[in-house]
Image (cartoon, grey):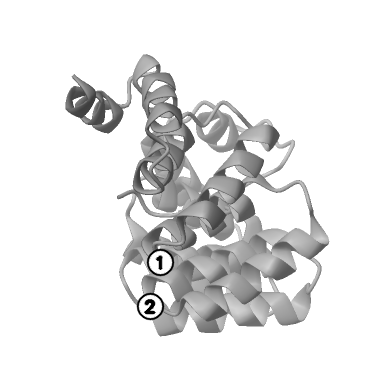
Amino acid sequence: MSSIAFSQSFLDVTDTSDAFIAYKNKDYAKAVILFSKAIESGTVDIDLYFNRGASYSKLHQYREAIKDYDKVLEMGPNHFNALINRGLANFRISKYQLALNDISQAIEINPNDEGAYINKAMVWTAKGNYAEAMKNLDKAIALEPINFEAFYNRGMIYLTQKSYSAAIISFGTALNIDSTFTDVYYYRGIAKHQNKDIIGARKDYEKAAKYGNMDAKNALKGFK
């Protein structure tokens, strides 16, 4: 079963230099090289370390990313985005307590960022503490009622807990917000199937399969 969705904090700048252009073009390996050259030239700029860290994160080189976020936080201890991204990088290498520490510190800096609560919920989910995860998702929804990630993640938790009716409602709300993330149909199909709504399950599997979800295609074989 897929992991839950999370909210990222990455580079959002208007700089037109080659490094930033490479990042925007999703050439993250080139971006790392160019940001490194700028750093090695002796330029002391917090954004260079942050954005190289973001590039490493995109390349799934999380330990290297953490080193850059550490440098950012040495220069600016209250750098919200660096705390979020370091938390996500720590999450990716299963250092869950460090991830919680970073995201909690970020929330202290900005308690009105719904994405931070979604990320904290993600870590609690990985630790198996669904009650704490739900509390944080509720906070995210209170801040932003139309939030796909929050409702999708709630659905995944309900599905894990076998609360199928609640999962169906949460997945439905997520799809009302954003119907382009078609895997949600597959997970709602599972919930409907377990809830004995065979017709509804088949319809959702068919929608997910139409968009290439192989698990949904395999699930449909059971209807033949």
Q: Residue 125 vs residue 146: left or right?
A: left
Q: Which residue lies furthest to the front in this view?
A: 196
**Circle nearer the viewer, 2 or 1:** 1
Q: Report the front residue among 70 and 207.
A: 207
Residue density around tag 1, few if under 14, some if 14–19, many if 20 or more, within 10 Å: few
Looking at the image, residue 62 lies above or below residue 60: below
Q: Write down the quadrant of residue 19 in the picture.
A: top right
Relative to 140, residue 145 above or below = above
Front in this rendered view, residue 222 or 155: 222
| Residue 36 disc label | none
Q: Position of residue 18 (x, y in %)?
A: 56, 31
Q: Tags 2 and 1 in contact by the CB under 8 Å rule?
A: no
Asked where in the image residue 72 lies, by quadrant, the reply is bottom right
Q: Residue at x 57, y 58 (%)?
A: 50
Question: Residue at 31% across / 68% down in the picture?
Answer: 93
For the point 40% across and 37% down, which residue is it? 189
Q: How many C-alpha atoms fall within 10 Å of the one at disc 2: few (<14), some, or many (≥20)?
A: some
Q: Is residue 178 above or below residue 6?
A: above
Where, quadrant-wise, is the C terminus in this rendering? top left
Secondary structure beneath label 2: loop
Q: Residue 174: horizontal and vertical position, in percent? A: 62, 42
Q: Residue at x 37, y 33 (%)?
A: 198
Looking at the picture, which amino acid does disc 1 mark?
A: Gln
Q: Is residue 223 in view from this perspective? A: yes
As displayed, is residue 61 above or below residue 16?
below
> Which residue is labeled 2 in the image?
127
On screen, residue 165 versus residue 189, left or right, reads right
- Name the residue at the top extreme: 210
Circle 1 sits on which residue?
A: 161
In front: 38, or 53? 53
Name the secondary structure under disc 1. loop
